[in-house]
Image: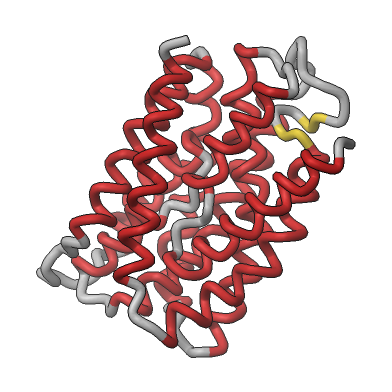
Amino acid sequence: MDPLLILALLAMGAFGGFAAGLLGIGGGMVLVPFITMIFTARGFPEELVVHMAIATSLGTIMFTSLSSVRAHHKHGAVLWHVVKMLAPGIVVGSMIGPWIGKQMNSSVLAFFFGVFVAFSATQMLINKKPAAARDLPAAPGMFATGGVIGILSGLVGAGGGFISVPFMTWCNVRIHNAVATSAALGFPIALAGTLANIFYGWGEPGLPEYSLGYIYAPALLIIVAASVTLAPLGARTAHRMPVRQLQMAMAVILYALAVYMFWKSAQ
């Protein structure tokens, strides 16, 4: 593999892992556009490149979430009872999301991802958190909420933090606990979504060598090597300093990535 490609993937993984630990966002919103750029430059089939970028990103979250949640757990911030209530719906939804994505062509999927990233960037920029207005719902409501989180996360290759964190904050969960719990939810999202992307993409014509369904294994391994190293640093940073300035910088980056995905969808 080209050394420059390896360095680019390592840099992406480091940045995505740090963002995942810091903000509980899973890193997917950052990784997918950059992976799309790299796969396009490598000459991967245009009709598969966004699907592969999303699937590969989701695969990395499976490892990043384990790394970041370990650091959050050391601070006692993960609400495991909330994880247990949301996880069943998340697993079901995360297997449905990739199936929906398979029905979309690459341009539509790129546009949808761009909308999602632009919305998330706006949410991060204005930093408006929903007022704590109620308690967490009962089991059926948690299952339904988990299903929505899973479907959207599986569709765009993200960790679900931009739904789960505001939802938990609205339900009177402290922001640090919400971020930590969102990081823990990244694992069931990524595991179910990764298995679904392998299944739905298996035997797809035109996939490059070393692909597992829609997942490009070499990129996955390189990104993971960097992301699991930086995710704990991001998690520790979240507990040691105000993250507002970092949120604003991240929002600007996400807007730029959204513009790229809109441009990609128009090609």
The colouring scheme, among rainbow, by chain, secondary structure or one colour, is secondary structure
Identify the residue at horizontal 24%, vertical 55% (top origin).
125
94 vs 114, left or right, is right
Q: Position of residue 221 (x, y in %)?
A: 79, 49
Seen from the viewer's position, the closer of residues 133 and 262 is 262
Q: In the displayed orientation, state which residue is furthest to the front.
A: 4
113 vs 53, left or right, is left
Q: Is residue 243 above or below residue 123?
A: below
Q: Position of residue 93 (x, y in %)?
A: 46, 42
Identify the residue at horizontal 61%, vertical 75% (top origin).
232
Q: Position of residue 169 (x, y in %)?
A: 24, 69
Q: Exactly how many numbered labels are in the figure? A: 0
Identify the residue at horizontal 35%, vertical 37% (top origin).
116
Q: Is residue 85 above or below residue 147?
A: below
Identify the residue at horizontal 19%, vertical 72% (top origin).
135
217 vs 168, left or right, is right
Query: On the image, which quarter does residue 57 sit in?
Result: top right
186 vs 162, left or right, is right
Q: Is residue 243 above or below residue 241?
A: above
Q: Is residue 177 above or below residue 130?
A: below
Q: Position of residue 115 (x, y in %)?
A: 32, 32
Q: Quadrant of the N terminus?
A: top right
Seen from the viewer's position, the closer of residues 165 and 235 is 235
